[in-house]
Image (cartoon, rainbow, N blue to C red):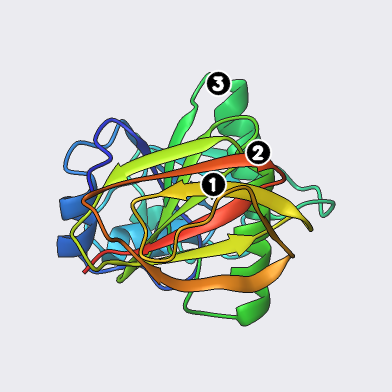
Amino acid sequence: MKFDNFSLVFCNGQPPSAARLRRLVSRPASIVCADGGANKALLTGYVPNLVVGDLDSLDNRTDLPPTSEIVRVPSQANTDFEKTLDVMLDRGMDNFLVTAFSGGRIDHTLANLIIAFEYSRKCHIVLADEEYVIFPVTETLGERIPLGTTVSLIAMVDETVITTDGLEFELSKAVLPKGGHGVSNRSAAEDIRIVVREGGLLVMIKDV
């Protein structure tokens, strides 16, 4: 899967390897970091264009070049990830590949997944770690993937209604309760399609 011309967004968790990121997005539209995500971007060889947050996690501003813009948002009413998405949306950006959202504190990981799902109603947002690409879906998702790929469907809204095509265990207007009832399906065709009729879900596709 490729996400060229997406803005590459770093949270402050564990980033994938530089090689993995370059396979996913060889030509990012911009490099944007949620506070301490700037540290993770620099470690993987990316120079931030924009850093947003209350700046309590940014190790050393002197590591950033003069071309890196820093936007301080001191409010404690939302997370640095939310602040970053808000600033990006205000600037007309709407295609985001989010990384380093997991691998650290489990509460941060869970919060980041929920935030990504909620913001997916306003923009095109995808998350990626070393092994998975995660799509928040409230309408339709179509992807081309290898046969036998693990595809998990995690309902984020109770009584989510979905129809699938191209999966080993097909669902037709199936009602999924919130939680893990759609874990560990697999692709039975190279082209898969998931239609959400009510509610919403995270589609987690193993990509290694």
In this rendered view, identify the residue nearer to me: 64 or 110: 110
Q: Residue at x 50, y 36 (%)?
A: 140
> How dense is the environment of label 2, judged by Cα within 10 Å: few (below 14), some, or many (20 and up)?
some
Give me the C-alpha separation between circle 3 and circle 2.
31 Å
Q: Give the image quarter of residue 134.
A: bottom left
Q: Residue at x 21, y 57 (%)?
A: 45
Q: Mark 3 or 1, which is nearer the eye?
A: 1
> How dense is the environment of label 1, judged by Cα within 10 Å: few (below 14), some, or many (20 and up)?
some
Q: Secondary structure at mark 1?
A: strand
Residue occupied by mark 3: 91
Q: Earlier in the sequence, mark 3 or mark 1?
A: 3
Could you tell me if residue 66 is visible in this image? yes
Q: Residue at x 41, y 63 (%)?
A: 39
Q: Earlier in the sequence, mark 3 or mark 2?
A: 3
Residue occupied by mark 1: 163
Does the residue at mark 2 contact the one at mark 1 (Cβ under 8 Å)? yes
Residue occupied by mark 2: 197
Q: Earlier in the sequence, mark 2 or mark 1?
A: 1
Q: Mark 3 or 2, which is nearer the eye?
A: 2
The answer to whether 148 appears left or right of 186 in the picture is left
Q: Position of residue 106 (x, y in %)?
A: 61, 80
Give me the C-alpha separation between circle 3 and circle 1.
35 Å
Q: Give the image quarter of residue 107.
A: bottom right
What's the amino acid at mark 1?
A: Thr
Q: Residue at x 27, y 66 (%)?
A: 149
What's the amino acid at mark 2?
A: Arg
Relative height, residue 129 to residue 75 (above, below): below
Q: Position of residue 104 (x, y in %)?
A: 52, 80
What's the amino acid at mark 3?
A: Arg
